[in-house]
């Protein structure tokens, strides 16, 4: 299965459980209702659902726990919830833009390359390692830079 379809399934599961606790059958029904191509929709197995629970917890910091009292699965938000929410939001945006046809007549996307995101991981490692970090700043309209 394609990565995009798997991420879409994770997103739909989280969306369903944000509305409230649900059984596996309710989650599976919601997945088939939300699937864009009904021909591709296949019932989710219990094994797939449990594998998805682990992946969702790892990737987005949403734990899906079984509540024995109400006999339903519910969404438990983690400590880094904001990051998971941003990731799902970004996926929703990309997915919506990719599935729209003739988008260029309505939406004009800026054609630019990402600038500076490759420095984020080393910067975060340095911060975690309590390393000293220095920056050189240069205004875009000036020839000289500042430390």
Image (cartoon, rainbow, N blue to C red):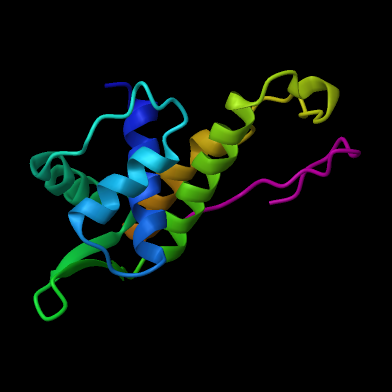
Where residue 134 sits: x, y (%)? 56, 52
The reply to whether the magenta stretch includes residue 146 is: yes
The reply to whether the magenta stretch includes residue 82 is: no
* Image position of 36 with respect to 119: above or below: above
Q: Is residue 45 visible?
A: yes
Q: Look at 35% across and 70% down and name the residue there.
A: 20
Where residue 139 sits: x, y (%)? 83, 44
- Per the rendered image, the range of residues in magenta is 132-147
Where residue 42 sits: x, y (%)? 25, 30
Where residue 98 sits: x, y (%)? 59, 25
Q: Is residue 114 left or right of residue 68?
A: right
Q: Look at 64% across and 33% down and name the residue there.
A: 115
Q: Name, please, the residue furthest toward the top.
A: 102
Name the residue nearer the viewer: 34 or 55: 34
Q: Quadrant of residue 143?
A: top right
Q: Look at 36% across and 29% down and name the residue there.
A: 5
Name the residue nearer the viewer: 132 or 16: 16
* Image position of 113 with respect to 79: above or below: above
Q: Quadrant of residue 132?
A: bottom left
Q: Look at 68% across and 20% down and name the residue there.
A: 101
Q: Is residue 144 left or right of residue 38?
A: right
Q: Name, please, the residue furthest toward the right.
A: 141
Please name the predominant secondary structure of the magenta segment in the image: loop
Q: Quadrant of residue 106?
A: top right
């Amino acid at each position: 299965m394609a990565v995009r379809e798997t991420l879409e399934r994770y997103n739909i599961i989280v969306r369903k459980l944000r509305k409230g606790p649900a059984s596996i059958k309710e989650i599976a029904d919601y997945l088939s209702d939300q699937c864009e191509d009904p021909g591709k929709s296949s019932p989710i197995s219990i094994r797939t659902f449990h594998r998805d629970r682990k992946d969702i917890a790892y990737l987005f910091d949403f734990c899906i726990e079984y509540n024995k009292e109400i006999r339903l699965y519910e969404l438990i938000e983690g400590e880094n919830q904001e990051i998971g929410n941003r990731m799902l939001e970004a996926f929703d945006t990309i997915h919506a833009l990719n599935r729209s046809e003739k988008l260029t007549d309505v939406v004009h996307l800026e054609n630019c390359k990402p600038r500076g995101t490759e420095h984020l991981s080393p910067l975060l490692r340095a911060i975690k390692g309590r390393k000293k970090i220095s920056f050189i700043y240069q205004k875009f309209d000036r020839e000289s830079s500042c430390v």
